Image (tube, rainbow, N blue to C red):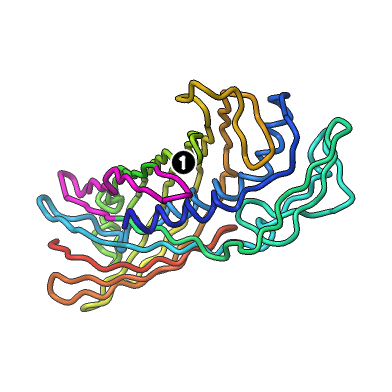
Amino acid sequence: MPRILTIIFILLLNQTVFSQINMQNTVDAKAFLHEYLTPLGESLGATLNNGWYNTARPHRFGGFDATITLNVLNIPGSKKNFNPNSIENFSSTDQLSPTIIGKGNGATIEYEGEQFTMPTQKSGMSFLPIPTLNFGVGIFKKTEINGRYVPNYKYNGGFIGKGEISMWGLGFKHDILQWIPIIGDAIPLSLSLQGGYTQLNTKINIIDQAVNIDVRAMNINLIVSRNILILTGYASVGYNSATTTFSAGENLSNLDSFNIGDLNFDLPVSMTFESKNEIRANLGLRFTLAVLALQANYTFSEYPVTTIGVGVSLR
């Protein structure tokens, strides 16, 4: 699982090559990198906000489950390019240039009387897969505590570099119908409020340059489900948000700039990008055979996500 996350980040970061220019204005640097990097942060945030549940019914006290899920985001075409002319102090005769997850010919961009050329990216990304290990345990008052975890994993990518990746998250699920007199016991449905927080941390060292991409993703959902024999259908409506922090250079002592190809940024570089908060809806199905549970669901949002999973569950 950590190897899959490692490969994703290696492919993304290995695309970046620029023509020579020194960007000392931190406001302009942030504005430019915001347009180039934000689609990656939003994609990661939307993907991490999935895979938390496969039913609205919380575990009884002492019940638990452990599930391996794979969340696969379908990256919208509109997020694969940005318009350099939309950024203050930048101009270009080209209307579009690939973002970090796009592909195609890079635009020639003018900044303070100088020109630099964005890279020609031969391979972009259409899908973003992120695996997670999830677990849940039932406590009091029809409440369930959830967690997810990928241990700190160190890798060496050869000429690409070496680094570390880790992920953790905490969440909850609480039955709402228990607080509705008469109706709560009468209807054959489960209705719960669910929330989750996930943090993905990366430390990547490329050609003696430290790069961190950290994502904090949060969601809250209202889930309804119906169980019929071995099948459980579930649906939800909810709210997503995410924050991505890109930083470089904090632990370097012999360099005075951070270089992405030939584009130079004065150190330290630290930028936080807030993703757009968005409404989401989800539909899914769970198949249970004894303690084995299989699940599949689809999230409808600006960044649509398909989730599949397999696990064990004792309710």
> Is 24 on the left-hand or right-hand side of 248?
right
Amino acid at pointer 1: Val
Coordinates of residue 253 in the picture (x, y in percent): 49, 21
Q: Which residues are magenta?
A: 133-162
The reply to whether the magenta stretch includes residue 147 is: yes
Number of marks in the image?
1
Q: Where residue 224 appears, x then y in whole percent?
A: 36, 61
Answer left or right for 63 relative to 295: left
Q: Is residue 261 magenta?
A: no
Q: Which residue is mark 1?
A: 215
Who's the residue at 66% across and 39% down the image? Answer: 33
Give neighbour class at mark 1: few <14, some 14-19, many 20+ (Cα, 10 Å).
many
**Residue 43 x/y as whole percent:** 53, 53
Q: Main secondary structure of the magenta part?
A: strand
In the depicted structure, whether residue 4 falls above or below residue 151: below
Query: Residue 310's image quarter?
Result: bottom left
Classify residue 35 as left or right of residue 291: right
Label 1: which secondary element:
strand
In terms of image quadrants, where is residue 190?
bottom left
Residue 259 coordinates in the image, percent (x, y): 62, 35
Considering only vertical position in the picture, is 27 above or below 185? above
The foreground one among 159 and 58 is: 159
Question: For the point 22% across and 65% down, which residue is it?
Answer: 311
Where the N terminus falls, by quadrant? bottom left
Residue 117 falls left or right of residue 239: right
